[in-house]
């Protein structure tokens, strides 16, 4: 956690000197890795509890993302990374598990940036995370992170296709009351202490009226509720609207377990996702 804390401090200090939207901006070519190591049982148990996963002999589908987050932060807060890390918003994720990963297996992790894309609200960077066991690629993900800034390209859109438009009509399955300190609690477990998730005051500095829930908590909680496991070939989730904390949200899914969503007051869709088996 020491290296992650150092990255957060470095990000806070360097963000004011980075200007998103520069036409000549490029992502660093570096690929950061963590040597193979088994999963620590204590942090895994804490993550399992806060996301609602049941005990299993396989890692939760979203957990390698958390394990690799210190690498992601180190890359994003480096001098060569073009976007200010403070205020970055996670906009989408695609997860591809190639097989179930056991907690006792030694995971080697790698993270790299895969380019910048104009977005209607700023600039989006795609980050790739890979997990290997003995050289075998066992898990990978692609994520979009948005740096919000003024743009004249109103037609600019994210690189990837939209999640199902019927997300607002999926049948309700469960309702969750989310406490105001959820962002701080999940941040303590995941290491993601972006100010937009912590307190109303720090969130307002980046244009949010209150602290917002982590996108990775919302998708993990949805997958935990559905009980999705080793049969999944891929998951895609879009974080369409922030969940302002505290909040009451509704988890919805179709009978086949292919499409799912998280909705808020008046049916507003916060998250929409699909599962491929």
Image (spheres, rainbow, N blue to C red):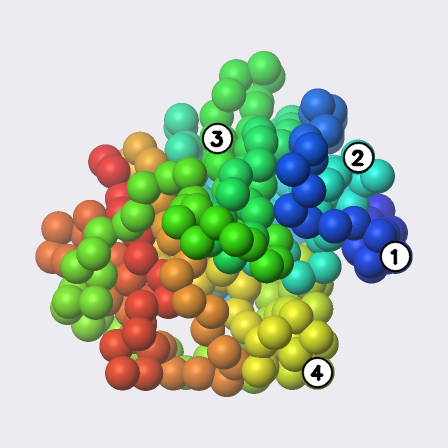
User: Looking at the image, which is closer to me, 131 or 246?
Assistant: 246
Q: Secondary structure at mark 3?
A: strand
Q: In the image, which disc is placed on residue 139? A: 3
CA–CA distance between discs 1 and 3? 33 Å
Number of numbered discs overlaid on the protein picture: 4
Measuring from the top left, give residue 178's x and y in whole percent: 46, 80
As drawn, is 79 to the left or to the right of 133?
right
Asked whether the viewer can see residue 2, the reply is no
Of the residues under marks 2 and 1, which one precedes in the sequence?
1
SS category of the residue bearing label 2: loop
Residue 82 is situated, as x and y percent measured from the top left of the image, at 73, 41
At 51% from the left edge and 57% from the top edge, which residue is drawn?
121
Q: Secondary structure at mark 1?
A: helix
Sequence-wise, which precedes: disc 1 or disc 4? Answer: 1
Secondary structure of the residue carrying numbered label 4: helix
Binning the other alpha carbons within 10 Å of mark 4 as few (below 14), some (14 to 19) or many (20 upward) gives: some
Q: What residue sits 23% from the left and 36% below the top?
A: 277
Residue name at image x 61 percent, y 58 percent: 149
Of residues 26 and 70, the one nearer the viewer is: 26
The residue pinned by badge 2 equals 80
**Are there few (<14), some (14-19), or many (20+) residues within 10 Å of tag 2?**
some
């Amino acid at each position: 956690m020491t290296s992650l804390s150092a990255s957060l401090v470095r990000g806070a200090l360097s963000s004011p000197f980075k200007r998103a939207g520069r036409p000549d901006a490029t992502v660093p070519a570096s690929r950061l890795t963590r040597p193979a190591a088994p999963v620590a049982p204590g942090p895994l148990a804490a993550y399992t509890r806060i996301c609602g996963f049941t005990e299993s002999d396989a890692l939760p589908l979203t957990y390698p993302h958390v394990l690799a987050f210190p690498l992601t932060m180190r890359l994003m807060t480096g001098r060569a990374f073009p976007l200010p890390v403070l205020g970055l918003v996670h906009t989408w994720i695609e997860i591809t598990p190639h097989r179930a990963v056991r907690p006792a297996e030694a995971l080697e992790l790698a993270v790299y940036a895969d380019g910048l894309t104009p977005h209607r609200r700023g600039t989006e960077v795609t980050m790739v995370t890979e997990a290997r066991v003995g050289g075998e690629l066992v898990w990978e993900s692609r994520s979009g992170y948005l740096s919000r800034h003024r743009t004249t390209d109103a037609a600019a859109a994210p690189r990837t296709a939209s999640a199902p438009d019927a997300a607002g009509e999926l049948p309700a399955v469960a309702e969750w009351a989310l406490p105001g300190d959820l962002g701080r609690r999940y941040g303590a477990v995941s290491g993601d202490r972006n100010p937009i998730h912590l307190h109303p005051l720090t969130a307002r500095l980046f244009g949010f009226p209150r602290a917002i829930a982590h996108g990775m908590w919302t998708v993990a909680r949805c997958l935990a509720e559905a009980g999705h496991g080793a049969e999944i070939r891929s998951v895609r989730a879009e974080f369409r609207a922030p969940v302002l904390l505290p909040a009451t949200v509704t988890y919805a899914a179709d009978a086949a377990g292919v499409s799912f969503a998280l909705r808020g007051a008046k049916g507003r869709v916060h998250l929409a996702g699909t599962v491929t088996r």
